[in-house]
Amino acid sequence: MHYDVGGTCIDLTLLFAAVFRSVGLRPFILILGEEYGSRHALAGAWTASQAPAGGRLWSPAAAQRAVGDGCLLVVETTLLPEGKAFEDAAPEGRSRALAGDLLWGVDVTACREDNRQILALPEQPCLTILSGLPDRITHAFSVTRSESAADLVRRSTIRVVASPDAQDVGRSWDLAGCAVRLGRSLHNQIQVSGHGSVSREHAVLFVREGSFHLKDLGSRNGTWLGEVALEPFAPRLLPKGGTFRLGDVKLQLL
């Protein structure tokens, strides 16, 4: 997270859960997605000093009810390293939690207090825990592979070729990182509207062995290479200059 100025959803969610706990709040973690597919994590905290009784694991209905009633503040943590304000991350977190694809909720404090199944780490200053980490990644293969992938992404652009909204045609994004998420939600690096044909988390573009690959994330209207629909969660090679479609929006990798 430090060197990439970002992080995966679970990295950031656990970090924020620890921050919430350190300032006296009772943290909560929400897991969204598909039982055997893509997952996403959100950080939450109870807004009242006394959290409702519900045990360690909460059902989707119970967790969503707590969010809807305002008892549970939920944050889309992946927005924050991108420069978004907390005022943006909280509404997006609430929206995602209420969207209907919630798998379960985890009350962190209840888990820590119930040591029959989940053992808490000993309380100690974070600097003690972090002191053994290297200043930067030094493993030669990891450095070479990640830097090569990031360089390929950095030299690439995605452009809208066709869209239901003609105003989007010609719009382009310069890429960064080693993986680029595409979809309708604010936390995607490439946010595509598509008049509802694009899912909140539609697809991800990433580098594998020096080449771009495209993976559909179980989208409602599919990800297409030419006339072929990608099988969900099965990456396909996407050559430079190639076009692909998210729902009704056609894009090109340049």
Image: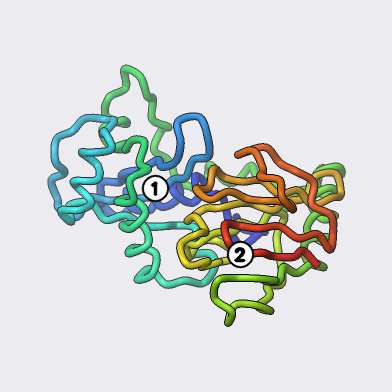
Which residue, as the protein is rendered here, is positioned at the far top?
Answer: 116
At x 41%, y 57%, the residue is: 76
Number of other residues with Cα within 10 Å of mark 1, as a class: few under 14, some 14 to 19, many 20 or more: some
Q: Is residue 153 left or right of residue 23?
A: right
Q: Is residue 171 left or right of residue 33?
A: right
Mark 2 — residue?
249
Q: Residue 62's x, y, as percent?
A: 20, 38
Q: Quadrant of the C terminus?
A: bottom right
Q: Quadrant of the N terminus?
A: bottom right
The mark found on residue 26 in the picture is: none
Mark 1 — residue?
18
The kind of residue on which mark 2 rests is Val
Q: Earlier in the sequence, mark 1 or mark 2?
A: 1
Work out whether 166 lies above or below 26. Answer: below
Q: Residue 244's x, y, as percent?
A: 71, 57
- Viewer-proximal residue among 131 and 1: 1
Query: Quick one: SS at disc 1?
Result: helix
The kind of residue on which mark 1 rests is Ala
Query: Quick one: SS at disc 2?
Result: strand
Residue 148 makes an appearance in the image: yes
| Colour scheme | rainbow
Residue 127 makes an appearance in the image: no
Q: Residue 75's x, y, as percent?
A: 36, 57
At x 42%, y 32%, the residue is: 121
